[in-house]
Image (spheres, rainbow, N blue to C red):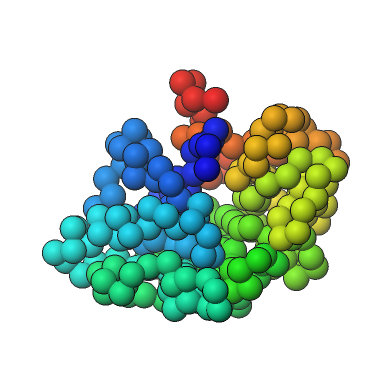
Amino acid sequence: MYQPRNTGGIYFCDGCRIHLDPGPGALVNMARLSIDPSKTDAVLISHCHPDHYSDAEVLIEGMARGGFRKRGVLVGSNSVIQGYGNFGPAISDYHVGLPERVVAMAKGSSISLVQMKIEATPTAHSDPTGIGFKLHTSNGTISYVGDSELNPEVTEAHRQSRVLIICLTRPISSRIPYHMCTEDASVLVKKVSPEAAVLTHFGMKLLHEGAEKQARYVEERSGIRTVAATDLMTLTLGKVIRVHRRCDMN
């Protein structure tokens, strides 16, 4: 809520353009990166908390060219699309009507977008319908764990991924329910054994103690290259995984 780091989500490009978890500031930061929201092909939302969906409706309008063209795909957890208990729905009936396709996903389900297959993975979070995602790209699998505690089901779901993206909310020795701390991340990375791990979604306490410190901890204990994400950072997945950081951002 204080925006010490931006919460605009993650943008994927591989035959189609996918915006994952567009929270506060997503639209503003797309403008900074010269990304045209009208070229987005799909919006994915992992669960019904506003730091993951607050900019989704305006991005859906952009994807649908201001609502003048029924276009694009909206994917979300059951809570996001339909509502579940006290959660959601996060998207208005009007905006649900704008995409060409709307899919409420649960763990174990999958969809295809152009050349990319997307699987919904389990989470253990306060939104019981929350999901993570595995994106099977032309250069290998990228896993997004989402907000979750660590458990064997979550670990198993993300095996065989080249890149593992972890929402790391809490630092060393600071575990809270429904989220991962640094020790959890190190165990997850070691068991999944990707080529690289990316830590993101940092809480205030973690930022105070240092995101790079958490990344070093995970890398030392897992033996896997681990990167602490920075605002507007770009990762290129090819034969080699390359990370480019914006020099004007922290």
- Residue shown at the point (75%, 70%) measured from the top left: 153
- Residue shown at the point (39%, 61%) measured from the top left: 43
- Residue shown at the point (54%, 74%) measured from the top left: 86
Q: Quadrant of residue 130?
A: bottom right
Q: How many marks?
A: 0
Q: Nearer the viewer, residue 73 or 148?
A: 148
Residue 15 at x, y = what percent?
Answer: 37, 56
Q: Quadrant of residue 34?
A: top left
Residue 104 at x, y = what percent?
Answer: 46, 77
Residue 203 at x, y = what percent?
Answer: 65, 42
Judged from this view, the residue extending furthest toward the top is 248
Q: Nearer the viewer, residue 135 or 120?
A: 120
Judged from this view, the residue extending furthest toward the front is 86
Image position of 219 with respect to 190: above or below: above
**Image quadrant occupied by the C terminus:** top right
User: Does residue 63 appear anywhere in the picture?
Assistant: no
Q: Quadrant of residue 219?
A: top right
In the picture, measured across the screen, residue 106 lies left or right of residue 216, that is left
Residue 73 at x, y = what percent?
Answer: 34, 68
Image position of 14 with respect to 223: above or below: below
Judged from this view, the residue extending furthest toward the left is 68
In the picture, measured across the screen, residue 7 lies left or right of residue 95, that is right
Image position of 72 with respect to 8: above or below: below
User: Does residue 44 appear anywhere in the picture?
Assistant: yes
In the picture, measured across the screen, residue 163 lies left or right of residue 46, that is right
- Residue shown at the point (67%, 33%) measured from the top left: 207
In the picture, measured across the screen, residue 66 lies left or right of residue 44, that is left
